Amino acid sequence: MPTSSTSTVHDLVAAAGQPQLLAFWEQLDAAGRDRLETQLRGLDWKQIADCQRLAASRRSAAAVAPPLDLRAAETPPCHPLDSGERAVIEAGREALAAGSVGVILMAGGQGTRLGFDGPKGTFPVGPVSGATLFELLLGPLKAVERRYGRRVPLAILTSAATDAATREFLNQHEFCGLDPEQVLLFQQGTLPAVDAPTGRLLLDAPDHVAVAPDGHGGMLAALAGSGGLSWFARQGVETIVSFQVDNPLARPLDPEFIGRHRLTDASFSTQVILKTDPAERVGVVVEQEGVTRVVEYSDLPDELAAERLADGRLRFHAGSIAIHAFHRAFLERAAADADSLPLHLAHKKVPFLDAEGRLIEPASPNAFKFERFIFDLMPLAERVTVAEVAVAEGFAPLKNPSGAASDSPETVHQAMVAYARRHLTAAGITVADRIDVELDAASILDDDDLRQLATSGSLPGNRIDHPQVVRAGEYRSL
Ligand code: UTP
């Protein structure tokens, strides 16, 4: 708790040109003053100045950034993820068996669209098991350990909005079967919102400055600041794969993905899906003059988004699904430079206190929020490798509430059941029509487990006639 005097905190806000932040100081009790002063002293004023400059440039029509010139940009070559190339798969398996792969689960988002009371990771989506996203995404780490005999270190990115509830969930669910020592939770930072017309910071309570999470790019500074990068290094991790909490079909530990990343000596590899609808709201990976980057859908002009190649595919068809593999040394270099990731600004509705201290819930956007995006590291990478995964095999995000046309609990449920049916059938197991089946995340790593199940005789007649979670027996090398 700061011990400095009232005049010192007044000096601080005066120097920052933000005296309105102490508008209710006289009315605060000692605890409220402490809370506000602690928050003010914890703010990164240099970064806030950067935010304000960005907001000012957005206000001045003359300084509005010209639209990206993508005329010369193309989609980079994309390696199919399921090519089955033995040497590539072997390289990935060797990395997993050597224990040199770690993962970061991005779970700091507020999940506003889903509107669920709790971190998105605690949302139940298992079509038969009712397992939560955390259980479905952490399970495969257990399955990898079972197969390769090595633990995969897992760092979970949380935010002020999700940290406490995520810790509570993991404690209550025994870390979804993982060893707590294998898991590091680290929290991303926040950035203040600024009033759009004036660039001033806002209060959302008499003793609290309005802030918002600093975006999934906040992962970089938070990982370095929490000691997470050295935590990975101490465990011999060379490849760090980040993925998002909302996609239960995510394959961050796919041996072919990791093998391709390793064999191409990439510092940044990324998974994409074939974008087929120009209106689909996914960013696309593009390459221009040797630089590869993600262009957000909002930055892609409609006519370019709709342009097609001679073979009928969209010209910009590499839809980013935010599964990235990094060389650890690359992340270390990027983290050493505070300006590696640019700030992005979004015009949003931010509740604030008016001069009389009334909480105003604006009906239209009134403020700028600031975020950093992890994919902005891509142009800094010497070599970028892109792997394309079939949607049905690797992408079923949960973004929207029940009943929505896309990315809802129902569409995720369907995608998971279809995935399970397809892989069971390919392994020679018959699944009765119209029943839900689910593959147990913690024991079924890939088709080898299913083929083994089919030859084990443990499923009578190799038939599934009732909804069930299919579990693997003990793994034997085929
Ligand atoms: P989204 O951009 O889809 O945001 O995050 P969200 O919070 O899940 O949902 P909405 O937009 O509020 O409805 C994509 C991934 O990035 C993580 C999320 O947890 C999710 O895994 N993320 C997002 C963070 O970790 N931190 C952030 O500040 C933002």
Image (cartoon, helix red, strand yellow):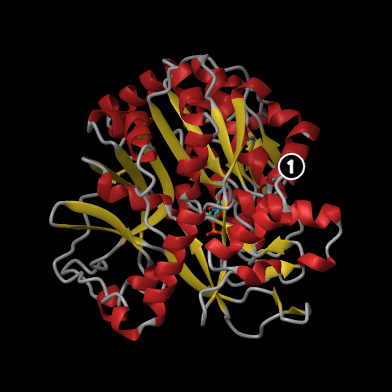
Quadrant for the N terminus, please. Answer: top right
Neighbour tally class for label 1: few under 14, some 14-19, many 20 plus, Cα within 10 Å: few
Residue 424, placed above or below residue 473: below
Quadrant housing residue 286? bottom left
Q: How many marks?
A: 1
Residue 310 rendering spot, x and y as whole percentages: 15, 69
Q: Between residues 3 and 350, which one lies in front from this camera angle? A: 3
Residue lying at 69% horizontally and 26% vertically, measured from the top left: 177
Residue 350, placed above or below residue 92: below
Residue 108, placed above or below residue 27: above
Residue 18 rendering spot, x and y as whole percentages: 58, 68
Quadrant of ligand 1: it is bottom right
Judge from the rendering whether residue 354 lies leftward or rightward of residue 18; answer left or right.
right
Judge from the rendering whether residue 83 lies leftward or rightward of residue 47; answer left or right.
left
Q: Amino acid at mark 1?
A: Met
Residue 112 rendering spot, x and y as whole percentages: 65, 65
Judge from the rendering whether residue 285 lies leftward or rightward of residue 164; answer left or right.
left
Residue lying at 68% horizontally and 29% vertically, measured from the top left: 460
Q: Which residue is mark 1?
A: 1
Residue 290, placed above or below residue 333: below
Q: Is the CB atom of the residue marked by disc 1 within 8 angstroms of ligand 1's nearest atom?
A: no
Quadrant for the C terminus, please. Answer: top left
Residue pushed farthest right?
A: 29
